[in-house]
Amino acid sequence: MSVNGIFGLPFYHSNIENRKLLNDQLYNVYHQIESNNGFDYYPGYSPSHLLSGFQKNILELYDCSHFENEIRKHIAAYLRDIRSDVTLDNTDHKIQAWMTVNKKNHYAMVHSHGTTDLAGVYYLKSISKGGRIFFRSPLKQLSNSRCFTQIPEVITHTPDEGKILIFPGWLEHGVETSESDDIRISIAFNVNFYPTIKENK
Ligand SMILES: [Fe+2]
């Protein structure tokens, strides 16, 4: 007999190995945004980090074909691993992506991606100090009992270049303060499948 974790959280992490073409394309996007209107702070929030335009989709605005092809492979692997009957081939869907730049002292408050089915992030440029992404456990009730306190309430990931993470859109997460003079660049993405569960009922 043994204790098994039930209600496991489907969390995906992988590394994009052959990423030169993809990264060159994304750096090109970065420079294009810089030379256009530049990056903006999230409207209505404290100036915590810079975004490639609020609610704009870089997959539609710029040539991100190598990046889009690569993340589609990882989204497909995620759906396969969780044995979903949804695939990118059999279900209508939309992928939206945006670029985030964290300079020194930038961070991201704890948030979720709301009703988005899947959320993900790819790290284009890492930093040496700070800037880790952290995820809050959705099993908050565990901390009410003394015997479960060794089970972490927060899991962190360093923003290593080439790393890709995919997780349910409702999972709460944030980014620790950057302590580096270098900039940290990541590309976040949302995946939504249609019709949604609500529309389907
Ligand atoms: Fe996020």
Image (cartoon, rainbow, N blue to C red):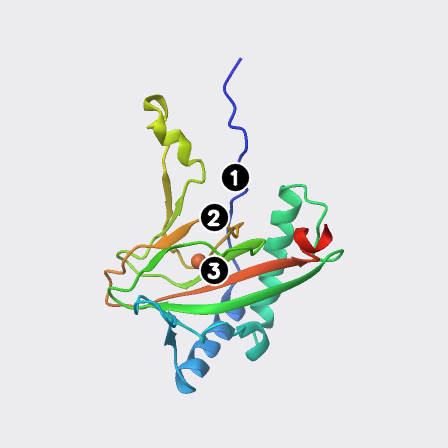
Q: Image quarter for residue 66?
A: bottom right
State the residue position of label 2: 171
Badge 1 crowding class, 10 Å Cα cut-off, few under 14, some 14 to 19, many 20 or more, is: some
Picture quadrant of ligand 1: bottom left
Q: Is residue 36 left or right of residue 108?
A: right
Does residue 144 appear anywhere in the picture?
A: yes
Q: State the residue lying farthest toward the top.
A: 1
Badge 3 crowding class, 10 Å Cα cut-off, few under 14, some 14 to 19, many 20 or more, is: many
Determine whether the residue tagged by mark 3 lies in a helix, strand or loop: strand
Q: Residue at x 40, y 30 (%)?
A: 142
Q: CA distance from mark 2 to mark 1?
A: 9 Å
- Amino acid type for the residue under numbered disc 3: Tyr
State the residue position of label 3: 122
Q: Position of residue 161 (x, y in %)?
A: 41, 59
State the residue position of label 1: 9
Q: CA distance from mark 3 to mark 2?
A: 17 Å
Q: Position of residue 43 (x, y in %)?
A: 38, 72
Q: Image quarter for residue 74?
A: bottom right
Q: Is mark 1 within 8 Å of ligand 1?
A: no
Q: Position of residue 129 (x, y in %)?
A: 26, 57
Q: CA distance from mark 3 to mark 1?
A: 20 Å
Callout 2 touching callout 1 (CB < 8 Å): yes
Q: Residue at x 76, y 55 (%)?
A: 90
The mark that comes first in sequence, 3 or 1, is 1
The mark that comes first in sequence, 3 or 2, is 3
Q: Say which of 16 and 115 sits in front.
A: 115
Badge 2 crowding class, 10 Å Cα cut-off, few under 14, some 14 to 19, many 20 or more, is: some
